[in-house]
Image (cartoon, grey):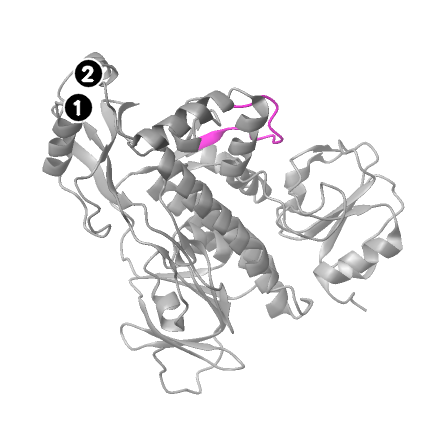
Amino acid sequence: MHSPQPTAAPLAYDVVIAGCGPTGAMLAAELRLHDVRVLVLEKETEPKSFVRIVGLHIRSLELMAMRGLLERVLRHGRRRPAAGFFAAIDKPAPKGLDSAHAYMVGIPQPVIERLLEEHALELGAHVRHGQAVTGLDQDDKGVTVELADGERVRARYLVGCDGARSTVRKLLGVGFPGEPSRTGTLMGEMEAGVPQEEIAATIAGLRERPQPFWVRPFGQGIYSVVVPAAEAGDRAEPPTLDEFRRQLRAVAGSDFGVHSPRWLSRFGDATRLAERYRAGRVLLAGDAAHIHPPIGGQGLNLGVQDAVNLGWKLAAQIRGWAPDPLLDTYQAERRPVAADVLDNTRAQTELLSAGPGPRAVRRLLTELMDFDEVNRHLIEKITAIGVRYDFGEGPDLLGRRLRDIDVKQGRLYDLLRRGRGLLLDRTERLTPGGWSDRVDHLADPGAALDVPCVLLRPDGHVAWVGDDQRDLDGHLSRWFGTPAG
C-alpha cells in the first residue's frame, strides 16, 4: 500500500468516493440524503463516448422509484418484458411477479450515468473529473487520499467504486480471487449493409449456432451484434470493426456488410470476488468488489444495489447513531448476493457453451422453464427481487424487500425518498418513539399489507414484522441505534 506522509490537513469531507460510475454516483446521492459531506473523484475527464445499452432490472427500478428517479429513467429508456434473461433462453415473463415495476428498462449507459451524477449533484455532492486516486493512508481518525497531481484530500472514509481494475482495492491489498477469462466475446452496435430479412434468414439457417451470438435490429438502422471472439484477448483493448467482420464470416458465412459502429467492446468470462468489502475506513462497492460476465445484465444493477445498501449505514456511522455492527452488515449482506450472481453467471456461461453436454443441459432447462415455478425462480434471481438477507428467524417477509404498495398517502415508495426508515403500522397503536428522527411513521389500517406492521430500513428491506411495541423497540435499537433524548 502506498503510504504518503501524514499531514495536518483537515477532514474536508466525510466520505471520498473513487469513481463516478453508476455505483459511485448512487452512493454519493444516498449519503447526501443524510447531509454527509461527499467528494467523488472520477479519473475520466469526459463521459464515455460509446452508447452501449444497459438494462435496469426490477429491483434497480424499485430503488429508482424509492428515490424519485424512475420517471427520469423512463423518459430516456425503453421498457421491455422481464423475460429471456437467463442464458438468453427465450421464455415469457412469469405472470404476477411481486413488483409494481415488473419490467426491464433498456437505457444508454452514458445516460444512466449522467442521470445518477446529476441526482448526486442536485443533492449537494461534489464531483471532480480528471482526478485519479494514486495513494491512500488511513489511521484511526480518517483516510488521506493522494491524487495523481500530488494533491492530498482527507476524509473520514474512502469508498472504492473504481471498477474491475480498482486502484483502491489494489492499494488496500485486498485479494480478488476467482477465474480468469477462458473465452472472449465481441459486443457492439453498428449498421448493416444488407436487409434485415436477409440477416434473419441467414441466421435462422445456421445448423450450428454458437452462444452467445446474435445480430438483432435495435431501431433506426442500428444492430446489436454479439459474436464469439477468436480468443479471450485483453478486455481493456477494444476490438476493431475488421475483427467483427472476420468473426461474423467465420460464424455465419457473411459479415452482413456491417459498418459505422457506434461502439465496440470485448468481454471475457472472468469471475472474481473481493475477499472482503471493508478494511478499516476503506470500503469497496460495485465492480471494485466483484466482476463476472455480463450474461443476464446484472453487473450495473448489482453495483447500484450495493450503493443503496451501504449508503444509509455509512451515513449512520458518520452521524454517530449507528449500532456497533451496522457497518459490517454491508459485507455480511452484499457479499453473499454477489457470490450468488457469480454462480448464476458461471451456470449461464456453461449453458451458452458449444459442447454437446452443455447443449443437452440447455435443452433440458429450456423444458423445465415451461414450469412457472422454475421460470419465476430464475427471473427473481436475475432481477434481484428474490434476495432475502439473513435477519434471523421470523416470517418469510423478514429480510426481503417490500413491493411498492398502495397506502393512504399514495404509494409506499414515495415515503422512502428521504432515505429514512419507515414504520408502516396497520394497528395504529405503535410508534417509533425516540427513533422518530431516523424513522418515519405511517398509521394506515387500509394499507395493502397482510401483516399487522412492518419496519422498513431505508433500502426498503423488512427489518421487523409484528404488532408488539416492546419487540419493535428492540429491532429499532438493532438497526437505528440508541433512541434520542
Q: Amino acid at mark 2?
A: Thr
From the top left corner, tell me how far across and down residue 153 is, in percent.
40, 75
Identify the element where label 1 is drawn: helix
The amino acid marked with disc number 1 is: Ala
Residues shaded magenta: 93-105
| Residue that mark 2 sits on | 202
Rendering coords of residue 8 (x, y %): 44, 87
| 189, 251: nearer the viewer | 251
At a point 63% along the width and 49% down the height, the residue shown is 389
C-alpha gap between disc 2 and disc 1: 7 Å
**Where is mark 1, residue-wise?**
252
| CB within 8 Å, label 2 to label 1 | yes
Q: Is residue 99 magenta?
A: yes
How far across and down, in percent of the image, does residue 21 sit?
Answer: 38, 52
Q: Say if residue 177 shows up in the picture.
A: yes
20 sits to left or right of 370: left
Note whether 179 is above or below 183 in the view shown: below
Q: Callout 1 environment at 10 Å: few (<14), some (14 to 19), or many (20+)?
A: many
Is 152 in front, or is 91? 91
Give the mark nearest the N terminus, 2 or 1: 2
Quadrant in which the N terminus appears: bottom left
Closer-to-camera residue (228/23): 228
Query: For the view shown, which residue lies furthest in the front direction?
Result: 357
Q: Secondary structure at mark 2?
A: helix
Residue 92 seen by the camera = no
Seen from the viewer's position, the closer of residues 128 and 136 is 136
Q: Residue at x 74, y 61 (%)?
A: 478
Question: Which quarter of the figure is the C terminus placed in?
Answer: bottom right
